[in-house]
Amino acid sequence: MLLYVLCLVLFCVGLYGVLRKRNLVKMIVGLGIIEYSMNLFFVLVGYKYHGRAPIDAQGQLIAQMVDPLPQALVLTSIVIGLGVTALIISIAIRIYEKYGTFDITKIKKLKG
Amino acid sequence: MELYILLIFMIFAAIVAIEVKDLLSSVIAVGAVGFALCLAFLVLKAPDLAITQLVVEILCLIILIRATIKKDLPLVIEGRWVFNTISTLAFVAVFLFFAWQAITELPAFGEPLMVVVKKYLAEGTAKTGAVNLVTAVILDFRAYDTLGEATVLFTSVIGIMAVLRRPGRKKIEK
Amino acid sequence: MIDNPKTGMTLIVKTITRLTIGLILLFGIYIILHGHLSPGGGFAGGVIVALSFVHMMLAFGKDVAVSKVSKDLASNLESIGAIMFLLVAMLGFLGGSFFLNIFSKGEPFRLFSSGTIIFSNLSIGIKVGVGLFAIFLALVILEKSKKE
């Protein structure tokens, strides 16, 4: 149970970064940390004590395996996360080119 | 035990990444979080995820460093510092309260329910012929999810091409 | 163009890159093809293939990488990967439903087993690898055009 709470604390650190920081790169970093903590949470829910990795071995019968379903969902989620991060970074680069800063309080003319 | 050490390390690295002044140091601290996550996946018996997280983290770091290098952080003077911090912390506290309510309903760590997966584990290799059950799940039992993932990745590549393309001829004439 | 000392990094980096880049690409293809037997699969292998191209671009400069894989070729290959995955899914209609594994399953622990999964892995590997390389290429081309 303590592991779940630590995972949530990691989520809250990322949430604080997204809400409080004024720099666009810091907000992207916070989003990345949120994504990591959620991936870890899914895998933590599927873990089984004394379980083995969900891969069959030749000539042995494996009785205990960890849950492969959250692992499969997280596997697609990691690659989606990379694509989304790259998209946000490209938008941030465009904003930097136009306004010359990453500071969101100085971007007052952001209309349309 | 290893998991506690890794998680505490990840939390410290995340705090460093959020609070440090230099942008390059912040990006490198995020890389530390990602590699610790890769080790945590390895401890949790998920080798597929560990490989994917390792290589994705490397590519993500290269892209982030290329984006942020040579762009120095101007010193941000933040107005209403106390009010903003207190409201953010209040929001985080409300989130933590409801998340705690949800967590107490979950099954304990190490004893998952495994209702759907029981069937996959029993019949997976015989039905699909794949030895690696994670691959059997993502490409046979739940292939619709993978199709949706491919669509999302395609959309994000198209979005990046659209955002980063050179300005059109109309703008140059002006 | 490859040995031009003005583009890319120093001679040491270029020599080491020339030795290792083929091995990295080969390792990515190995991970893709053995996705149903060992850890890995289309996603991890695709990212490794993309990393080998990124490695080439970082060491030799932009022009060499573009001469090997241009932006149009990358876009076309990514579309081909997506269409291949959809075609593998459509093959299931021959047996009755979407995403049905119609080929023979074969014997486990062999490379050519598990029916359509190996083709799905191949198409996802092409799609992810070329797509991520296209993202990096777009970012680098923007950086160049800004300097001019």
Image: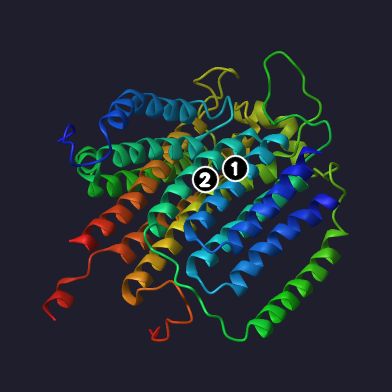
Q: Position of residue B142 (x, y in %)?
A: 61, 45
Q: Position of residue B13 (x, y in %)?
A: 64, 52
Which disc, if any, is residue C48? Answer: none
**CB within 8 Å, label 2 to label 1:** yes
- Residue under the point 35% across and 69% down: A94
Mark 2 belongs to which subunit?
B
According to the image, label 2 marks what residue?
A: B57
User: Would residue A107 appear left or right of C66 to someone viewing this image?
Assistant: right
**Residue lying furthest left in this view?**
B173
Q: Position of residue B140 (x, y in %)?
A: 58, 39
Q: Nearer the viewer, residue B105 or C48?
A: C48
Which disc, if any, is residue B35? Answer: 1
User: Would residue C18 appear left or right of B64 to someone viewing this image?
Assistant: left
Q: Are marks 2 and 1 on the same chain?
A: yes
- Residue under the point 35% across and 37% down: C55
Mark 1 belongs to which subunit?
B
Where disc 2 sits, the SS reads helix
> Is the N terminus of chain B in the top left, top right, bottom left or bottom right quadrant?
top right
User: Would residue C1 appear left or right of B111 to someone viewing this image?
Assistant: left
Question: Is C118 placed above or below C51 here?
Answer: above
Image quadrant where residue C21 sits: top left
Q: Position of residue C111 (x, y in %)?
A: 51, 19
Label whose residue precedes the other's in the sequence (2 or 1): 1
**Disc 1 marks which amino acid?**
Phe
For marks 2 and 1, give the CA distance.
7 Å
> Is the C terminus of chain B in the top left, top right, bottom left or bottom right quadrant?
bottom left
Q: Residues within 10 Å of mark 2 (few under 14, many from 20)?
A: many
**Disc 2 marks which amino acid?**
Glu
Q: Is residue B144 visible?
A: no
Question: Is C24 placed above or below C124 here?
Answer: above
